[in-house]
Image (cartoon, rainbow, N blue to C red):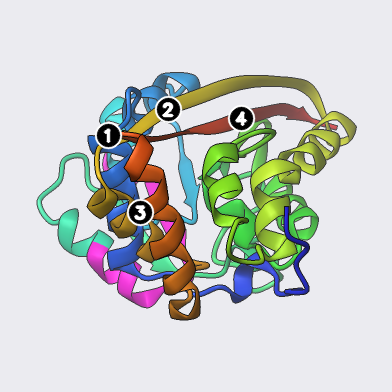
Amino acid sequence: MLMSEDKRTCAEFVDTIDKLGTRLNTNTQYGDNELKTWLPPHLEVREGERILDVGCGDGTQMRLVAETIKKDHMCIGIDNDPEMIAKAKRLSEGFTPAVDFMVMDMDAIGNDNSPFKDDEFDLMYSVYAFYYSQNEFKALDGMKKKLKPEGRIAITGPYKDNNIDWFNFLNQYMDMADSIMASTTTFMEGIKKYADENFSNVRTNEFVNNITLPSYEALKEYWVANIYYDPKYDEGFEKFARKHFETNDKFTYFKKAQMIIMEGKK
């Protein structure tokens, strides 16, 4: 594996609506498990709860959660990307029950000027977004402050050998940033440690999606859609992707995520 000298944090990598959409579509179209159907029951959502989706993207997951809540304006999603929030609002027009969105940085949830009250939420969750925080433990402290005494925080993110086959392929021709490798392998270990120290009831769930890309074209589309894509590596990708499909009729990798639920703040 190549050693990286790229010291950027995850928050410094630029994502776009189109890139995110392509990655999600790839994982859904070619995978054997869907996060959007797995998520709501594992969040243990209960009717009438007050919910905050941290890093909500276009609101797809929150709308699914809101179907269980059933009451208007009980679910709110925040994201620091104005374009993403604008899209979430468009997609949620006419949705029942009504849901709300605002542009907000997750690191500001616990600030003195936060729009949220202390002890306001029954459930605060983040899915494949929390590693974009500049300081995840400060963000968790802020979330804990806004959580009801017996409320729940649920953080879902990649861990352990997530994407290992994909990263092994990439490391043939490019240096992976240290922050990317940490966010996808060890990030959740720190979240678990925080949960154990700050909550009385901590439990975990595992999500695995096995993905099979049937062609060079599908693999290239996925490569270009990643946040660490850089055109200077296209020649290397071309070489090793073509070589792979000379002897294989597919490219397989798996997404592995862990959900950590923390309840009963100390």
Return the mark for residue 209. 2
Q: Closer to the N terminus: mark 4 or mark 3?
A: 3
Is residue 244 at all visible to an observer of this figure?
A: yes
**Residue assigned mark 1:** 30
Q: Residues within 10 Å of mark 1 (few under 14, many from 20)?
A: some
**Residue assigned mark 4:** 258
Q: Residue 157 in the image: x percent, y percent?
A: 59, 41
145 or 130: which is nearer to us?
A: 130
Callout 4, which amino acid?
Answer: Gln
- The answer to whether the residue labelled 1 contacts the one labelled 4, judged by CB atoms less than 8 Å apart, is no
Q: Residues within 10 Å of mark 3 (few under 14, many from 20)?
A: few
Q: Secondary structure at mark 2?
A: strand
Q: Residue 79 in the image: x percent, y percent?
A: 45, 64
Residue drawn at (28%, 50%) of the image: 216
Badge nearest the viewer, 1 or 4:
1
Return the mark for residue 242. 3
- The answer to whether the residue labelled 1 contacts the one labelled 3, judged by CB atoms less than 8 Å apart, is no
